[in-house]
Image: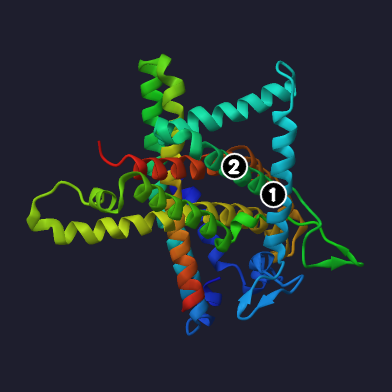
Amino acid sequence: MRRYVAALSLPALALFLPETAWAKGQFHPEKEFAQHDWVPIHLGSLNLSITKAVAYLLLGAVVTILAGLFFMRGRTLTRRGTTGELIYDIAQTQVAEQGLPSKAIGRWFPYVATLMLFIFVVNLLGFIPLPLSDEKWHGIPTFGIYAATSSLSVTLSLALLTFIFTHVEGIRYNGPVRYFKSWIPEVPKAILPLIVPLEVLGQFMRLISLSVRLFANMLAGHMLILTFVGLIFVLENVAVAVIAVPAATAFYLFEVVIVVGIQAFIFAALSAIYIGSAIEPEH
Amino acid sequence: MLSLIAAAAPNVDAGKAIALALGIGLGALGAGVGIGNIFGSMIQAVARQPELRGELQGIQWLGFALTEAVVFYGLIGGLLAYVLI
């Protein structure tokens, strides 16, 4: 008990430090996530400019295609071929077969597998320092980490694709009447007016949860790393680096090893589950 | 720091900081319990039936990500409070 009190009173002592001990440098991590038009493209009121996020997405698409070509062309029993088979196996057994009914796998496996690979590549590109940033140092763009998936527009449009495909496929396989009837659960008629709005709302909550999960994960991951490194500049003391840099490295490794893969897997698996549950509602 | 807080009393920034901290802090509290539960149950399940490990692993990570996302709803709430007010 005494040990806890001692441990708690140490940070409390910091409250009585003079004001000058808290002198602050300038640190604005949110500026890393601002979008500036690099190549302005305006169609009426629609802004289709090439920004940082778009550049990362284009790069991600190219890398995804190249990775697909590279790994799927490998001969069997070489390291390249085995990696390709491993990726394919995860996409098939862990993602597609978990959610999709067998009659729809042929049609929807490409979509969920692409989704998994693409989000994985875009997430991973976000943790590799690339000279794609707005700041310049002697004319050379500075290296920075930024993931396109830490922008809500990107994840929302990916989630919107799944949302549209879910309902289109539900209607195509079951017909509109049977499909929308399947939303309504088997409950006594009296509480239907309470349940039906909740079910309809639930369909839209899927859209929000699917997009916000990926977006906030990547945003928070980058923010954590930036904040730890930024502490050195906020407190204006190089000695902070002794703690800040290892902590930032630990979070970096956590993000790269666990979060990047898990988020890509989750997005694809949930897309498969949503599409599958629309094709074959309630047994 | 107490002098800083006293100086910032009429300032909205203090309130914003509290909103952000509470948003992420309370969110992390709930998700911490949830994630601990998931991994605890996973350890128990694998200890009892090690042959089911492969099947359970997919469900485990799904549950982990679904629970972990709860933190970020808190964070988004805090950010909304920070940006809107």
User: What residue do we see at 15% from left, 46% from top?
Assistant: A186
User: Circle 2 sits on which residue?
Assistant: A114
In percent of width and height, residue A247 lies at: 65, 46
User: What residue do we see at 91% from left, 67% from top?
Assistant: A139
Residue type highlighted by circle 2: Thr
User: Circle 1 sits on which residue?
Assistant: A61
Front position in the image: B48 or A270: A270
State the quadrant of the C terminus of chain A.
Answer: top left
User: What residue do we see at 55% from left, 67% from top?
Assistant: A16
Q: Residues within 10 Å of mark 1 (few under 14, many from 20)?
A: some
Q: Is residue A115 above or below residue B72?
A: above
In percent of width and height, residue A112 lies at: 52, 41
Is residue B18 visible to the viewer in this orientation of the structure? no
In percent of width and height, residue A13 lies at: 54, 60
Chain for disc number 1: A
Front position in the image: A250 or A76: A76
Front position in the image: A140 or A171: A171
Q: Is residue A202 above or below residue B31?
A: below
Residue A249 in the figure: left or right of residue A95: right
